[in-house]
């Protein structure tokens, strides 16, 4: 294996490939446990590197005990009921709601990019503005957004719109422009009109790549969403992380971060599966 | 009136403008199989795009049945060298795309009539599939699962199902291996005989032009600075016998002249 490590034509077997891909995870976890153990040995009250047991307890409380702002909720009942009254569930629900709003707002962005790429006048009208808009650092607009739209949902959603939609518009624009001219001419010669060509030919062809582009931008969506939640929110996963930071609640913060990563991984996986199901031809090519 | 009239066309590209076509004039009658021949970069494809309506000339005009067309439409079918099929559609959907898009609007899928008509169109497409030598087992395949020759066969069926008056083919067989190419030449010749569609076929292969066309038009530049003009416009004996082709190729490529159709027939 050491011989083939830097060989371009190396073909690692399944087992070594699997071992390699998990080795960094194992190393990271082992390193953390070692450091946590050493620090706890020096100081049993240490809070920066909680042990696995502390994190499990923290996550258990977050997932099965009522949120602190909802003390009247019963702390008894079935596991499902307890989970639905928990801090983790409420935060996940709030963040997911904002995330879904953001994803829905990407639909007009895709359509705008498509029209900009296909219709020269639409392109001439929007392109320069979107290019300029894309260069604005969205987080620098945060104070303006909170002043203009208040600290409600709208400001957070606008932050995501400003942060992510220009990228999606420009990605879709470029993908549209990359569709071979022959395909457009062909569609016209077969009787398609302008909008038939846009929606029945071009959009269908670029859709799998657009979905991939959205997948690659999921992290940016979450980044802007978290920035908004951390600064002005009363619920949500990022709000909770920011709140726990004040109490040095690392036993909950670390599981929360892993939970966010897991959710994002699942959304990404879901989109990948959806892409494969909706566009089998794309996998063929 | 000729089906295609090309009047004194000039085209130039770039800055400073580089002339590609200069004063090209042609008349193509209904039912002709015209092969447009010339070296790479002589403006064959440009001339085809002008007839297609996807490009505008600097001077002159192109009339189809006496009317100027400013964009491609279903009167002129098109088979390019590459990207001839929609990659997201199966073979059958590629073939039925033309009739479907002509008969049903974007939201036509929502009507029950669409599904009835779709069944009819698919059965018609299967007939076309058989005519071009493909089987029903190929119907559900995507273009990427087909060989180059099969893709071009489907592209021809896709173009012909809409029954265009003119079929424009731009180096349609250039990327194919010699064996497949011969098969495709036979296929397009047979389809031309069956349908009577006027075909304008761009190629840089002299043998192919002679084997296919009823008329060969050669575009050539007089000097490198000037645009191409029609340097030869000649009828091809029909059928042009295989044994005559090498001789004709030699004559054509040397620019020494051309036998008339009668000469060719009498020679055999």
Image (cartoon, helix red, strand yellow):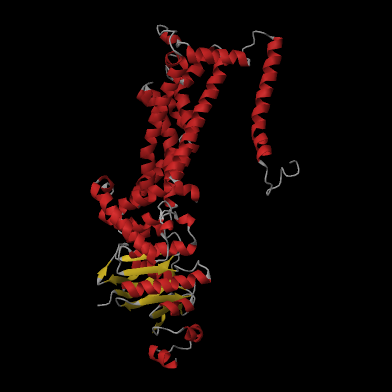
Q: Is residue A267 above or below residue B103?
A: above
Q: Position of residue A161 (x, y in %)?
A: 40, 33
Name the side, left or right, on which A191 lies relative to A278. left
| Residue B127 in view here | yes
Q: Is residue A217 above or below residue B262?
A: above
Q: Position of residue B6 (x, y in %)?
A: 32, 74
Q: Position of residue B214 (x, y in %)?
A: 38, 80
Name the side, left or right, on which B30 lies relative to A109. left
**Quadrant (top left/top right/bottom left/bottom right) for the C terminus of chain B:** bottom left
Front residue of A102/B8: it is: A102
Q: Position of residue B50 (x, y in %)?
A: 36, 68
* Residue at the farthest right position: A3
Q: Quadrant of residue A183?
A: bottom left
Front residue of A7/A169: it is: A7
Q: Residue at x 36, y 22 (%)?
A: A150
| Residue B41 in view here | no
């Amino acid at each position: 294996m050491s011989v083939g490590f830097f060989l371009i034509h190396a073909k690692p077997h399944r087992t070594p490939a699997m071992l390699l891909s998990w080795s960094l995870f194992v190393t990271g976890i082992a390193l953390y446990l070692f450091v946590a153990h050493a620090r706890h040995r020096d100081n049993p009250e240490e809070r920066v590197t909680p042990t696995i047991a502390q994190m499990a307890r923290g996550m258990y409380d977050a997932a099965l005990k009522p949120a602190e702002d909802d003390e009247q909720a019963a702390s008894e009942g079935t596991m499902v009921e307890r989970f639905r009254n928990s801090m983790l569930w409420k935060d996940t629900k709030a963040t997911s709601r904002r995330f879904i709003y953001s994803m829905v707002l990407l639909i007009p962005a895709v359509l705008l990019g498509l029209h900009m790429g296909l219709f020269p006048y639409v392109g001439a009208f929007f392109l320069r503005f979107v290019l300029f808009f894309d260069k604005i650092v969205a987080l620098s607009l945060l104070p303006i957004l909170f002043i203009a739209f208040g600290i409600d949902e709208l400001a957070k959603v606008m932050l995501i719109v400003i942060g992510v939609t220009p990228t999606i518009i420009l990605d879709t624009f470029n993908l549209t422009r990359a569709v071979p001219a022959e395909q457009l001419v062909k569609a016209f010669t077969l009787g398609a009109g302008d909008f038939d060509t846009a929606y029945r030919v071009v959009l269908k062809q670029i859709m799998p790549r657009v979905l991939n582009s959205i997948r690659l931008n999921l992290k940016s969506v979450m980044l802007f969403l978290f920035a908004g939640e951390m600064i002005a929110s009363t619920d949500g996963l990022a709000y909770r992380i920011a709140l726990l930071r004040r109490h040095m609640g690392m036993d909950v913060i670390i599981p929360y971060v892993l939970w966010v990563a897991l959710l994002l991984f699942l959304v990404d996986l879901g989109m990948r599966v959806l892409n494969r199901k909706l566009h089998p031809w794309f996998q063929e090519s | 009136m000729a089906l295609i009239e090309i009047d004194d066309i000039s085209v130039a590209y770039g800055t400073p403008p580089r002339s590609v076509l200069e004063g090209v004039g042609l008349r193509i009658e209904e039912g002709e199989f015209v092969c447009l021949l010339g070296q790479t970069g002589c403006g064959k494809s440009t001339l085809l795009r002008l007839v297609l309506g996807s490009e505008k000339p600097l001077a002159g005009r192109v009339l189809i049945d006496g009317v100027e067309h400013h964009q491609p439409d279903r009167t002129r079918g098109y088979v390019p060298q590459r990207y001839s099929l929609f990659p997201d559609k199966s073979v059958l959907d590629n073939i039925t795309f033309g009739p479907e898009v002509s008969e049903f609007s974007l939201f036509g899928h929502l009507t029950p009539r669409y599904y009835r008509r779709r069944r009819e169109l698919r059965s018609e497409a299967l007939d076309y599939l058989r005519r071009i030598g493909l089987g029903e087992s190929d119907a559900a395949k995507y273009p990427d699962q087909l060989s180059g020759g099969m893709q071009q066969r489907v592209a021809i069926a896709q173009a012909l199902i809409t029954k265009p008056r003119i079929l424009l083919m731009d180096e349609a067989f250039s990327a194919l291996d010699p064996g497949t190419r011969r098969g495709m030449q036979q296929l397009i010749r047979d389809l031309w005989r069956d349908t009577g569609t006027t075909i304008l076929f761009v190629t840089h292969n002299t043998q192919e032009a002679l084997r296919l066309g009823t008329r060969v038009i050669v575009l050539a530049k007089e000097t490198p600075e000037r645009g191409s003009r029609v340097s030869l416009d000649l009828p091809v004996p029909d059928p042009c016998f295989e044994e005559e082709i090498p001789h004709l190729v030699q004559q054509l490529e040397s620019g020494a002249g051309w036998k008339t159709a009668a000469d060719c027939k009498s020679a055999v």
